[in-house]
Amino acid sequence: MKQKIVIAGGTGFVGQYLTEKFTTTGYEVIIISRQQDHVHWGDTTSIINALENAVMLINLAGKSVDCRYNEKNKKEIFDSRVNTTKALGEAIVQCKNPPALWINSSTATIYRHAEDRPMTESTGEIGSGFSVNVATNWEKTFFSFHFPATRQVALRMAIVLGKNGGVVTPIKNLVRFGLGGRQGSGKQMFSWIHIEDLYNAIVFLQQQPELNGIFNTAAPNPVNNKTLMQLFRKNMKIRIGLPTPEWLLKFGAMIIKTETELVLKSRWVIPERLLQSGFVFTYPVLDEALKDILTGE
């Protein structure tokens, strides 16, 4: 009989990749989603049945933050993270044979805007504002549960880079249209992780039963925004990239209904605990990651 992994919120960019990888390596993958053909969030009994005897639960659920932060969207962003985490914890409590490991998403955005020094799990400073409030309540809900048989790991994820979604597509479009220069000052740091390394980190954490708690899942070599855009231009073989000043970013964000925080916040995050635990990144350097992602496109 196949071992079972449950992925909550598994229909997005990251969830689809993880589903394919785990299925290919011989697991049965069950997805909890609001979409048809999956276990539905409103069906508590089916969620409990899915979690029974699972080797791992991975929770990726949450409304995309690529939207305007009006009151309606802010409530949906908050509730879609905190309430799903609470529902999963309550379901695990009712399991006779609960998952051995519960990995819950968090975000590297929990740290403050940092241009002065990197943020690690041990020395990082928590920021302020809406996004940080979501992240802290998300983690607080997750760690409010204590299970005798289920290990808990929260992943403070940096921006995930991969071939079929995420931020790569909009950045590529900017570069193609000649707008691939620095955004704002260009000094803000960009923490990232190749989607393959995210998968590998999850497998690594699964295989190390002594590890729990908070892990920064970011490549060990973040770059500033100016370098990020240079490397995209280099790998796409486009020489010219006009810079976008902050005022124009704010205007553009209103037009396309998003927030400039996604571009202008300086996320300088180092995966101290993963490195100390012996994890080896396949793509530690952004240039190599982009060569892989942009090859053949």
Image (cartoon, rainbow, N blue to C red):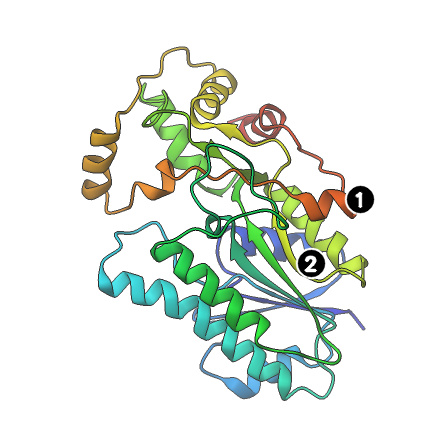
Occupied quadrant, residue 74: bottom left
Q: Is residue 38 in sight in this rendering?
A: no
Q: x and y percent of residue 220 in the render? A: 64, 35
Q: Nearer the viewer, residue 197 or 271?
A: 271
Residue drawn at 34 percent across, 49 percent down:
66
**Is residue 148 positioned above or below 249 on the image?**
below
Kind of element beneath mark 1 = loop
In the rendered structure, the answer to whether residue 70 lies left or right of residue 189 reads left
Q: x and y percent of residue 145 in the render? A: 60, 78
Residue drawn at 36 percent across, 62 percent down:
77
Q: x and y percent of residue 210 in the render? A: 80, 62
Q: Is residue 43 in sight in this rendering?
A: yes
Q: How many marks?
A: 2
**Is residue 106 positioned above or below 117 on the image?**
below
Label number found at residue 278:
1
Q: Earlier in the sequence, mark 1 or mark 2?
A: 2
- Say what amino acid the circle numbered 2 marks: Thr
Q: Quadrant of the N terminus?
A: bottom right
Residue drawn at 71 percent across, 37 percent down:
281
Residue drawn at 50 percent across, 42 percent down:
164
Give the Cα separation between the discs numbered 1 and 2. Answer: 26 Å
Residue tagged by mark 2? 23
Packing grade of label 2 (10 A; few <14, some 14-19, many >=20) is some
**Is residue 156 positioned above or below 9 on the image?**
above
**Is residue 62 positioned above or below 278 on the image?**
below
Q: Nearer the viewer, residue 243 or 35?
A: 243
Q: Name the residue at the top extreme.
A: 239
Q: x and y percent of residue 153 in the render? A: 65, 62
Q: Are marks 1 and 2 in contact (CB under 8 Å)?
A: no
| Closer to viewer: mark 1 or mark 2 | 1
- Say what amino acid the circle numbered 1 marks: Gly
